[in-house]
Amino acid sequence: MVRSGIIFYVVLAVACSANIAQADGPYFSEGIKIGEVTPTSAIVWTRLTTVAQGGIGELEDAAPGMPGDVRLTYQSAEGSVVQTDWMPVDPDRDHTVQIHLKYLEPATDYALKIESRDVDGNAGATFEGKLKTAPSAESTDKLQLAVVTCQSLRSNDAGNDGFHTYRVLESIRPDLFVNTGDIVYYDKIPFSRNAAQARAKWSCMYSMPSIRAFHSIGASYFIKDDHDTLKNDCWEGQTYGDLTWEEGLAIFREQVPMGEKTYRTYRWGKDLQIWLTENRDFRSPNTMKDGPEKTIWGAKQREWLIKSMKASDATFKLLISPGAVVGPDKRGKNDNHANAGFTYEGTIARKLIADLPGAFVICGDRHWQYHSVDPKTGANEFGCGPISDLHTYGGNPGYQPAMHKYFDKGGGFLLVTVERKDEKPQITFQHIAPVVNPDGELKVRNSITFGK
């Protein structure tokens, strides 16, 4: 689909201008994001704003931040009420705050309520959500993981509501959710060429009702890629307009719940462990000659990844990457482990996955859904595809029978189910369309089960 920048900008102005006239704030125009969830901890992110919903079209004014304080109250069905102290938002970090919760119980539902007040102590808006913590490492309960990528303002398919995929996800409420990057596109209309515009794009995106509603009900993990760092296929030392590399890295950590490191691993019960890799912070320039010194992960992350994956006793091990490891990629790319320019480290990555029982790659970034098997090692990779069918621009390799077990140029999300049948663990990968069937059931494009 081709849209002119002028026409699209008018549409964006409408989509981001649904301000709701209410009493004085502070408001939570972007709701909350609940991230880095473990069996006993989580981080709740929020931002105070001067308006209750959206922005007014110009990126710098999408949803202006507002000083003030927030307080979180949470409670499980059988537990006592816990309330945090009032905490100020940080004006130097876009009026955001990240609340670290500890001493939670595994596999437990918590009701959340966040309140605001202004700098004079006057009560503002409230916002409610819910969280279920990860199970203990011994649990064999059924789990569902959803994975998405590539969501730009110009490819929202549900008008002012945002994206159909998030309404589908809200209806099934997966146990955990991963956004693999390209969460916002600084280098696509409307362009974000400085820090204020970059922050405003996050505000426009996460003020969309469908996104805000979904992120208030469960555990999410966020990975960044090129378009939410600076621009397409970027690396350290580059800029995009007045937006610097250092600002891009800092703004990402400011806009999502994030702990100490941007690469990390999480255990979800006896049968599932996930690894989330960082593909921008430590990479070599794409133009560098391939060899042992050229890297996407950096030596320290690569050593950690190999060591921790080999040490894991989880039945199924998922390497969730912002870029492809197996591919095939479209012609002309040279930015990920599936490309010739990173053959050395890509070979290490594919062999790691192939040699570990129950290991698979899930990748974002690519604008099509697929399941590939590397002809040399047998490593399996699942591409989740873009979040909407409108985000299929940029080309694709087409069906490649030597590698593809499944290929579709559509969007939506990848749904992964881990469960036990007759005491035997199995994992199912399903490519899901961003709509449901007339009977309300998920529209499954492809499904394959391992371990049955």
Image (cartoon, helix red, strand yellow):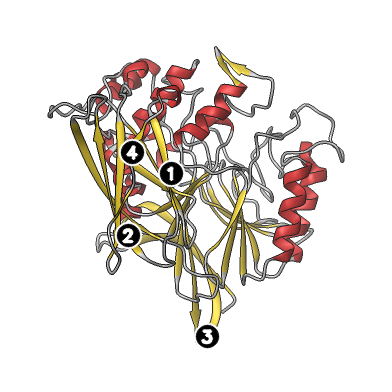
Q: Earlier in the sequence, mark 1 or mark 3?
A: 1
Q: Is residue 448 visible?
A: yes
**Residue type at tag 3:** Glu
**SS label for mark 3:** loop
The residue tagged 4 is 157
Q: Which residue is mark 3?
A: 423
Taking the image as drawn, is residue 154 in sight? no
Q: Which residue is mark 1?
A: 387
Who comes first in sequence, dot 3 or dot 2? 2
Where residue 27 sits in the image (x, y, percent)?
Answer: 24, 32
Residue 326 point in image, percent of width and height: 69, 51
Which class describes the residues within 10 Å of circle 2: few (<14), some (14-19), or many (20+)?
many
- Quadrant where the N terminus is found in the figure: top left
Residue named by callout 2: 110
Q: Amino acid at mark 2?
A: Tyr
Mark 1, residues whose alpha carbon is within 10 Å: few (<14), some, or many (≥20)? many
Residue found at x 37% / y 54%: 218
